Image (tube, rainbow, N blue to C red):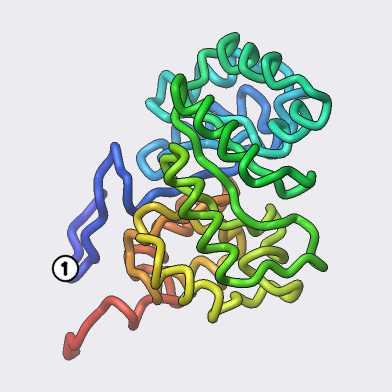
Amino acid sequence: MNYELKNIPVRTEKPRTTGFTMAMDKGLSLRATEDFVDSCSDFVDIVKLGWATSYVTKNLAEKIAVYREAGIPVYLGGTLFEAFIVRDQFDDYRRVLDKYGLEYCEVSDGSISLNHDRKCEYISTLAKDVTVLSEVGSKDAAKIIPPYKWIEQMQTELDAGAWKVIGEAREGGNVGLFRDSGEVRQGLVEEILTQIPEERIIWEAPIKAQQVWFIKLLGTNVNLGNISPTEIIPLETIRLGLRGDTFDHFIGEIKL
């Protein structure tokens, strides 16, 4: 940090497994990627190339190399995995991972109907070669999954070999964990936490109010995902109680 302040929450250090920030790259140019890494690499633990943007992104190999040089792993969005699966191209998907030297991948079923046992088989197969993040929840706002089913699916996917499970929210933060207004489904989150260890979950929270809610509930070192590149440093200040939203939450009983 550039100067000293007292009573700042203690952040975990990279490589982190808690206090994890997953950034969502929705198609940054190579130059923008370089600028992003220059300003934010200390605060980014992994980058997701959103949904299937990697299919149309220019200079994909060079972009991945920029992230790799900065020590930031990259993975392809779960929707791309689903696009391969629905076309019966699982082996082709694995070849893409090999082609770009990717060490992480996402398994999801938010846009397709996929038998859950089959999803767990994909997780188990991929986990032999790469680190798997599995996503739970639907991208269809009309599809409400009861809490017991979220818990059951998260647990079975962890048992199948997933490193962490991701709570679905999309890049808009208006499905899955959230109502269409963006409000957190508090009862769902609290029930999930009765059964699934918080360090094994990444909560997609692209909207500031959602990030604040999770930080107030679970502390500075909660795992958060789908963070826009322009919101990485603002999020870090929220984690540290250096933005109005969490200023009083972390400052304690300091008297002026």
* x and y percentages locating residue 8 in the rendered image: 22, 66
* x and y percentages locating residue 144 in the rendered image: 73, 69
Count of marks overlaid on the render: 1
Reply above or below: 224 against 64: below
Reply above or below: 148 against 158: below
Mark 1 neighbour density, 10 Å: few (under 14) some (14–19) many (20 or more): few
Residue 40 shows in the view: no
| Occupied quadrant, residue 237 | bottom left
185 horizontally vs 130: left or right: right
Residue at left 70%, top 44%? Answer: 115
**Towards the viewer: 60 or 93:** 93
Q: Secondary structure at mark 1?
A: loop
Residue at left 37%, top 63%? Answer: 239
Return the residue at label 1. 6
**Towards the viewer: 61 or 190:** 190
Residue at left 51%, top 40%? Answer: 133
* x and y percentages locating residue 193 in the rendered image: 41, 69
Residue 189 shows in the view: yes
Amino acid type for the residue under numbered disc 1 = Lys
Reply above or below: 243 against 233: below
* x and y percentages locating residue 100 in the rendered image: 57, 13
Location of the C terminus (image quadrant): bottom left
Residue at left 48%, top 58%? Answer: 234
| Occupied quadrant, residue 68 | top left
